[in-house]
Image: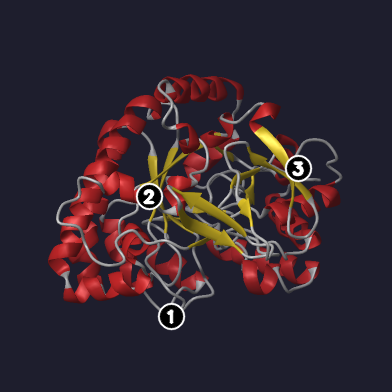
């Protein structure tokens, strides 16, 4: 099988020839730039650059040499943009390692060593001295909901996730963006046998937390349901405009479309099933229905935390794939998930506990842990290997290598 065939077979619950592998296909399956720099050194990759394409999370765009070495089967089409050396400039990361930022990103260095980002004279994001990611500092609807949502898109641009969007969306305001997106994607489709992913977001619950702040929006779900419904309806109007354009532009040449909406905490979902169905399920179903009706793309939902209680409804809403499969949360045990939902949805992630094992174990611990996960998740397809969310800055490079080498060992691939 080609990598693309392998990914599609797994998503369609057909046994692929090998367990497919991901690193960096989207900003929830990637690697910190700090960890990436060390990984390159460990792999002996001396050429190229550590380019921070997601500046909020400080994630590196994995290069071809690294993808080949780790056996990665899928690419983010966002990598097609910012492809010239002149699109980047040199910086030094918190640990002293060299990297590059996109030229449009110019955070302000404060006297205390912190970096801040201003939008329209307001500080919207801050990374403390020696920090490794930016925090949101401004919430446009903190004081309450507006009378109407005609200015919603402008309010969203005051949130770091939109204002500091990763590629390709950092080019979305260019007049020929959609033409560029199609032409570049078609070019990549003709030159790679890997699967392709496009990231669209279309977050609903999360945008409520970005605009109102988490504590307020959680209370709003119970105390101000009419306002929540107004906001979610307005968000869907904007999201559908984007989704239609994405499907028209690359729906025939991209394999997977990635949505996002973090619905879980360590101990359970942020809301009951009834509340999820009341506010969000029908809208998620609309997103999935549009994609499946108009394109052959598979739909991918990134949702952190313990979402066991919501999985039946997420499946019913039409999602093909769930990520990051946070198995260190309540009710998210791998064998339980595979037994109950393994025939209905593809698990993209869960292959290695990023915090406890990958970050704190030995290479031998990591190897055995990954092999154990593969024994559970791999049979019958429905699984793409990825760590639980992004690989963090402090993770030893030897452990990252051990994780991907364990997948190669399981697949019978010689390295």
C-alpha distance separating marks 1 and 2: 24 Å
Q: Which residue is mark 3?
A: 69
* Sequence-earlier tag: 3 or 1: 3
Q: Is residue 229 left or right of residue 183?
A: left
Work out which quarter of the rendered image holds the C terminus and state it: top right
Mark carried by residue 311 = none
The residue lying at 55 percent from left, 60 percent from top is: 126
Q: Is residue 206 left or right of residue 335?
A: left
Colour scheme in use: secondary structure
Q: How many marks?
A: 3
- Above or below — where is 122 with respect to 306? above
Residue 94 x %, y %:
73, 59
C-alpha distance separating marks 3 and 1: 36 Å
Please report contact status of discs 3 and 1: CB closer than 8 Å, yes or no. Answer: no
C-alpha distance separating marks 3 and 2: 28 Å
* Sequence-earlier tag: 3 or 2: 3
Q: Which residue is mark 1?
A: 267
Viewer-nearest residue: 389 or 227? 227
Residue 363 x %, y %:
79, 66
Q: Is residue 45 left or right of residue 350?
A: right
Quarter where residue 314 is shown:
bottom left
Q: Secondary structure at mark 2?
A: loop
Judge whether residue 409 can be spotted in this image: no
Q: Nearer the viewer, mark 3 or mark 1?
A: 1
Q: Secondary structure at mark 3?
A: helix
Mark carried by residue 320 = 2
Residue 64 x %, y %:
70, 35
Q: Secondary structure at mark 1?
A: loop
Work out which quarter of the rendered image holds the N terminus and state it: top right
- Above or below — where is 337 with respect to 122? below
């Amino acid at each position: 099988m080609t990598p693309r065939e392998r990914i599609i077979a797994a998503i369609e619950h057909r046994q692929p020839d090998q367990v497919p592998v991901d690193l960096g296909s989207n900003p929830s399956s990637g690697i910190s730039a700090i960890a990436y720099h060390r990984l390159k050194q460990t792999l002996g990759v001396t050429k190229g650059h550590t380019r921070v394409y997601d500046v909020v999370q400080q994630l590196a765009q994995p290069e071809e040499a690294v993808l080949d070495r780790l056996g990665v089967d899928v690419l983010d089409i966002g990598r097609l943009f910012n492809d010239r050396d002149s699109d980047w400039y040199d910086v030094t990361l918190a640990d002293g390692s060299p990297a590059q930022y996109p030229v449009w990103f110019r955070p302000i260095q404060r006297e205390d060593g912190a970096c801040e980002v201003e939008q329209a004279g307001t500080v919207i994001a801050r990374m403390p001295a020696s920090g490794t990611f930016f925090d949101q500092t401004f919430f446009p609807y903190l004081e309450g909901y507006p009378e109407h949502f005609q200015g919603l898109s402008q309010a969203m641009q005051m949130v770091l996730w939109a204002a500091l969007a990763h590629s390709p969306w950092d080019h979305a305001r260019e007049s020929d963006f959609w033409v560029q997106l199609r032409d570049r994607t078609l070019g990549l489709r003709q030159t790679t046998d890997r699967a392709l992913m496009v990231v669209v977001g279309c977050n609903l619950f999360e945008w409520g937390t970005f605009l109102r702040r988490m504590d307020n929006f959680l209370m709003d779900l119970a105390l101000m349901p009419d306002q929540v419904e107004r906001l979610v309806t307005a968000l869907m109007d904007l999201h559908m405009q984007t989704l239609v354009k994405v499907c028209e532009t690359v729906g025939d040449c991209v394999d997977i479309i990635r949505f996002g909406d973090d619905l879980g905490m360590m101990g359970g979902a942020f809301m009951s099933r009834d509340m999820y169905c009341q506010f969000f399920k029908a809208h998620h179903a609309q997103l999935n229905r549009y994609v499946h009706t108009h394109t052959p793309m598979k739909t991918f939902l990134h949702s952190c935390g313990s979402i066991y209680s919501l999985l039946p409804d997420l499946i019913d809403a039409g999602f093909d794939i769930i990520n990051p499969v946070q198995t260190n949360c309540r009710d998210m045990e791998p064998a339980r998930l595979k037994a109950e939902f393994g025939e209905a949805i593809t698990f993209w992630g869960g292959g290695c506990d990023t915090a406890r094992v990958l970050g704190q174990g030995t290479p031998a611990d990591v190897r055995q842990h990954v092999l154990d996960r593969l024994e559970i998740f791999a049979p019958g397809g429905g699984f793409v290997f990825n760590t639980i969310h992004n690989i963090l800055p402090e993770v030893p490079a030897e452990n990252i290598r051990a994780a991907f080498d364990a997948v190669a060992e399981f697949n019978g691939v010689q390295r």
